[in-house]
Image (cartoon, grey):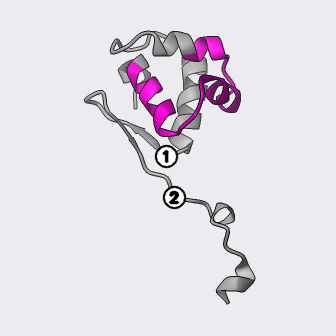
Amino acid sequence: MLFTEVTGSQIRQARELLDCSRYELAKRSGVSRLTVRLYEGHGAEPLQARTDVLGKLLKFLEGEGIEFRPNGGVFVQRAIPLFRRNIHPEATA
């Protein structure tokens, strides 16, 4: 996705879909909490942001299964990693 298409509302929706606080999103993506708050504050307007900072945020969100839709929507598709399923390899043999 082109950075100019991402809106503050989409960032907020993505964070909420991941059930993630602003603090947690900032920490895990490598940007400041103030940056997350400022981006989200732009609402439905496309973000005018530094590409390196926005890139970090989008890389993390997309890595978590977030897909930003051109119509302003957000979709998440996440598979639960094997180590988080509480399945022990010996139990499946």
> Over which residues does the magenta segment extend?
9-36
Residue at 25% x, 29% y is: 71
Which corner quadrant of the image does residue 46 belong to? top left
Q: How many C-alpha atoms fall within 10 Å of the one at disc 1: few (<14), some, or many (≥20)?
A: some
Q: Main secondary structure of the magenta part?
A: helix
The amino acid on which the numbered mark 1 sits, given as a three-letter code, is Gly
Please say whether residue 20 is one of the residues in the magenta stretch.
yes
Q: Is residue 7 visible?
A: no
The N terminus sits in image quarter: top left
The residue that disc 1 covers is 65
Q: Does residue 31 appear left or right of residue 70 in this picture?
A: right
Which corner quadrant of the image does residue 53 belong to? top right
Q: Does residue 80 appear left or right of residue 86 in this picture?
A: left
The C terminus sits in image quarter: bottom right
Label 1 SS:
loop
Query: How far separated are the C-alphas under marks 1 and 2?
Result: 8 Å
| CB contact under 8 Å: marks 1 and 2 | yes
Residue 92 x %, y %: 65, 85
Residue at 69% x, 64% y is: 83
Residue 3 x %, y %: 44, 22
Question: Compared with residue 8, is residue 56 higher up or lower down, i.e. above or below?
Answer: below
The amino acid on which the numbered mark 2 sits, given as a three-letter code, is Ala
The residue that disc 2 covers is 79
Nearer-N-terminus badge (1/2)? 1
Residue at 60% x, 13% y is: 35
Please say whether residue 27 is one of the residues in the magenta stretch.
yes
Question: Compared with residue 87, is residue 53 higher up or lower down, i.e. above or below?
Answer: above
Label 2 SS:
loop
Question: Compared with residue 75, is residue 7 higher up or lower down, i.e. above or below?
Answer: above
Residue 58 x %, y %: 53, 30
Residue 16 x %, y %: 48, 33
